[in-house]
Amino acid sequence: MDIRRHPPAAQDRPLTILGLETSCDETAAALLRLHPGGRGEILCDRIYSQISEHAPFGGVVPEIAARKHVEILDGLIVDALREADLGFGDLDAVAATAGPGLVGGVMVGLMAGKGIALAHDLPFLAVNHLEGHALSPKLASDLAFPYLLLLVSGGHTQLLSVEGVGDYTRLGSTIDDAAGEAFDKCAKMLGLGYPGGPAVEAAARRGDAARFSLPRPLWRKIGCDFSFAGLKGAVHRVWHGLDTPTPKDAADLAASFQAALGDVLVDRTTNALKLFKARHGPRTFVVAGGVAANAVLRARLEALAAEHGFAFTAPPPHLCTDNAAMIAYAGGLKWRAHGADGLDAPARPRWPLDEAAASMHPASGSGKKGPKS
């Protein structure tokens, strides 16, 4: 039996973990020290952003992303070890994103992590990228389970009750597009540049959010699911209905879009806060994922939490976007709780956090790759 797959025997000593993240267009490597009790200390967090490679296309091109990961990752790992003043012999484990994400990119980090683990006889930790986001707030604060999580990113928008490491209950998910995807597509329509989230937020600061009337999908409906495809389509119709769109038009439409999307987030999250409160009482409401870096949306959600008697927290902006520190941290917590993974752990382009709910009631359909959420 491979003893490396069992939880570490020394639960009372710090563990040093190399984390790798390649699920989309960020190539990342980090060194993290996991202390007894669950505190994570980031020793080094290196990220290579592929913005310049994808900007001409207005979005992520999977083949370009995968090739860039291949070119960058090895050197990034060496640089991270050098910055942290560590060698492979100082590591206790290697963690890598195994999904969900663009499968070509996922495989680059996954195979690199497995290779290092095999060469240096280290435990390997196959990490769910979404679990990295879900646990990332604990890297920045002393956050106790359970808490309500709004995970809002380029590929996912979900409301989850986080009960513990590996224990997640889906309350709601998007039935079509994710919020971050809607930001990117609207930015491309309006010619605002890439990445779309920061571009729309910047344009919205100059715009009039009351000028254009846009729909609020699923507004005041029961449940906690989201829908953004109709909002994205409405932006397209308004923009192409203008005779000669100006920068002022773009700013006003960006502001109107951001306000509408914020209304949807607030409305659906209100239902989730009530459900969570009925079961656990008012505890902490957490917002994580790339869209959580949007200051306007973050402020609205913080006010909503206070209105319902919840504490509010969100990771700092550098931990909201994709990073390897959260992968190392989630991997370490998972290792201590449940043990390591085998080197046969597969790449999973779809990997729901609440697999039971996703299998029985997929929010956005299911196919050969399995349910998305």
Image (spheres, grey):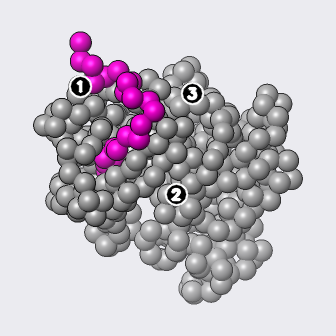
Cα separation, mark 3 vs mark 1, equals: 23 Å
User: Residue at the top extreme?
Assistant: 1
Mark 3 vs 1: CB contact within 8 A: no
Look at the image and say whether residue 317 sits in the magenta stretch.
no
Placement of 246 over or under 116, stated as above or below: below
Q: Residues within 10 Å of mark 1 (few under 14, many from 20)?
A: few
- Classify mark 1: helix, strand or loop: loop
Q: Quadrant of the N terminus?
A: top left
Q: Residue 167 shows which numbered tag?
A: 3
The image shows residue 230 at horizontal and vertical percentages of 62, 53
The image shows residue 131 at horizontal and vertical percentages of 49, 39
**In the rendered structure, which amino acid carries the disc numbered 3?**
Asp
Cα separation, mark 2 vs mark 1, equals: 30 Å
Residue that numbered label 2 is attached to? 320
Q: Is residue 368 visible?
A: no
- Classify mark 2: helix, strand or loop: helix
**In the rendered structure, which amino acid carries the disc numbered 1?**
Asp
Q: Residue 182 shows which numbered tag?
A: none
Q: Residue 344 shows which numbered tag?
A: 1
The numbered mark, 2 or 1, whose residue comes first in the sequence reads 2
Query: Which range is magenta?
Result: 1-27
Cα separation, mark 2 vs mark 3, equals: 21 Å
The image shows residue 107 at horizontal and vertical percentages of 24, 41
Look at the image and say whether residue 9 sits in the magenta stretch.
yes
